[in-house]
């Protein structure tokens, strides 16, 4: 079965796409963003997938790719266009190449015009295609910098993308209005730049008079992406917490498991956010835990030491997840949620105070 997820970076309005094959557990990421590598890795882990490669649709001008950082963390390969000019990749792609993940594959199509190295990736059954900036939803990437050419882009889109089956779903690299997906048939009919009875001259006239501002991050993003996202200063990987073995979740918070919490010393503050009746009820509570019901937590932050790690606890891990996010937003640096809460703690046979044996 195919696993498909569309992920979003709100800063650059970039879409990252995860494609996985459940039988083999192999997965690809298209257009990963540097700042979201930890998020992407958490999703892969939770879905039981192994990242084997990252793919770029082009050398981006508005964000730094996460390709290098994914490779540094997990050993995934970096795949880029042979025509894009990037260095440090593990494989350069040519038109007609195939990128396998388990029993599935993507076909590589060259769609230059926004940049020389623009690629579109077409799923093996032609049900989906990932168009980068060559074709956006009711639009397309600009053609006034980075080797842009209206004539090349017009031909690329018509020959390589709009020639796909009408029902093929098209997923762009960006959207600035919250739109997520379109189709070949829709773009043939409704795209004001390519659709209807427009021709190459119409398209060139449109693109040559857009009057767009210069991309804000181009001077940072393009040089970094030519290196596949590798930092110039050889900076170390983003630091992971050292006070306990934690796991970052796709929900966006750190979790700690019962065995790991048992190994923590007194420097860790355990905050139980249940109600008093639950704290003293059948499940009991952790030794040394401080009871601060979730509804009271915002008013009682001063009771906690900001210099010490905090672990939040509740019955199932749900309310305490909210508490952990609340503490992080309040500026607490080291916060983790007890995954599964007291239910998992009791199931693991860990020590409690009170409760029913």
Image: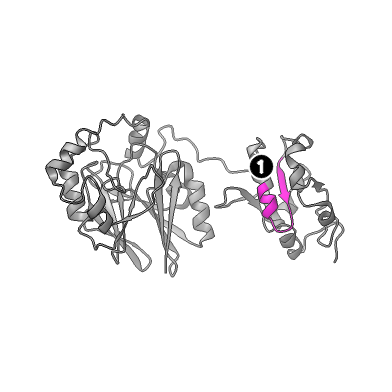
In the rendered structure, the answer to whether residue 200 lies left or right of residue 51 reads left
Q: Which residue is mark 1?
A: 326
User: Looking at the rendering, which quadrant does residue 107 occupy?
Assistant: bottom left
Q: Is residue 255 above or below residue 209?
A: below
In the rendered structure, the answer to whether residue 212 lies left or right of residue 19 reads left
From the top left corner, tell me how far across and down residue 149 is, in percent.
18, 39
Q: Residue at x 75, y 45 (%)?
A: 295
Crowdedness near tag 1: few (<14), some (14–19) or many (≥20) residues, C-alpha within 10 Å: some
Q: Is residue 107 above or below residue 58?
A: below
Q: Regarding mark 1 in the picture, which secondary structure is present there? A: helix
Q: Residue at x 47, y 35 (%)?
A: 235
Q: Residue at x 77, y 60 (%)?
A: 350
Query: From this viewpoint, is residue 93 visible?
Result: no
In the rendered structure, the answer to whether residue 276 lies left or right of residue 238 reads right
Q: Nearer the viewer, residue 158 or 82?
A: 158
Report the coloring of the rendering. one colour
Q: How many marks?
A: 1
Query: From this viewpoint, is residue 186 visible?
Result: yes
Instruction: Please state, as top left, top right, bottom left or bottom right, where the C terminus lies in the image.
Output: bottom right
Q: Nearer the viewer, residue 339 or 93?
A: 339
Q: Nearer the viewer, residue 59 or 51?
A: 59
Q: Residue at x 54, y 59 (%)?
A: 46
Instruction: Please state, as top left, top right, bottom left or bottom right, where the N terminus lies in the image.
Output: bottom left
From the top left corner, tell me how far across and down residue 281 is, in percent.
84, 59
User: Looking at the rendering, which quadrant does residue 342 occupy?
Assistant: bottom right
User: Looking at the rendering, which quadrant does residue 68 occupy?
Assistant: top left
Residue range in magenta is: 309-322
Residue 78 is inside the magenta segment: no
Residue 311 is inside the magenta segment: yes
Q: Nearer the viewer, residue 141 or 46?
A: 141
From the top left corner, tell me how far across and down residue 242 is, in percent.
64, 43
């Amino acid at each position: 079965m195919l696993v498909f997820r569309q992920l979003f970076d709100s800063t650059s309005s970039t879409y990252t796409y995860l494609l996985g094959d459940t039988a083999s557990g192999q997965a690809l990421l298209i257009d990963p963003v540097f700042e979201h590598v930890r998020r992407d890795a958490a999703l892969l882990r939770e879905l039981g997938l192994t990242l084997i490669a990252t793919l770029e649709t082009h050398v981006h001008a508005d964000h730094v790719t996460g390709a290098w950082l994914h490779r540094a963390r997990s050993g995934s390969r970096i795949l880029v266009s042979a025509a894009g000019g990037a260095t440090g990749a593990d494989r350069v792609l040519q038109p007609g190449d195939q990128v396998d993940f388990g029993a599935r594959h993507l076909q590589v199509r060259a769609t230059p015009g926004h940049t020389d190295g623009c690629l579109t990736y077409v799923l093996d059954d032609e049900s989906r295609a990932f168009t980068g900036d060559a074709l956006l939803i009711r639009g397309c990437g600009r053609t006034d910098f980075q080797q842009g050419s209206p004539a090349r882009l017009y031909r690329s889109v018509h020959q390589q993308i709009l020639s796909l089956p009408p029902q093929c779903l098209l997923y762009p690299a960006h959207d600035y209005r919250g739109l997520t997906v379109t189709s070949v048939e829709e773009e043939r009919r409704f795209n004001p730049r390519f659709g209807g009875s427009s021709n190459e001259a119409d398209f060139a006239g449109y693109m040559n008079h857009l009057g767009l501002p210069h991309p804000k991050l181009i001077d940072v993003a393009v040089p970094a992406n030519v290196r596949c996202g590798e930092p110039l200063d050889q900076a170390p990987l983003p630091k992971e917490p050292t006070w306990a073995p934690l796991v970052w979740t796709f929900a966006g918070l750190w979790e700690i498991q019962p065995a790991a919490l048992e190994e923590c010393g007194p420097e860790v503050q355990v905050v139980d956010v249940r109600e008093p009746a639950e704290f003293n009820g059948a499940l009991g509570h952790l030794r040394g835990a401080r009871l601060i019901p979730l509804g009271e937590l915002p008013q009682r932050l001063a009771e906690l030491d900001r210099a010490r790690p905090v672990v939040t606890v509740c019955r199932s891990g749900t309310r305490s997840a909210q508490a952990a996010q609340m503490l992080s937003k309040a500026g607490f640096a080291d916060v983790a949620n007890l995954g599964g809460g007291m239910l998992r703690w009791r199931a693991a046979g860990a020590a409690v105070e009170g409760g029913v044996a």
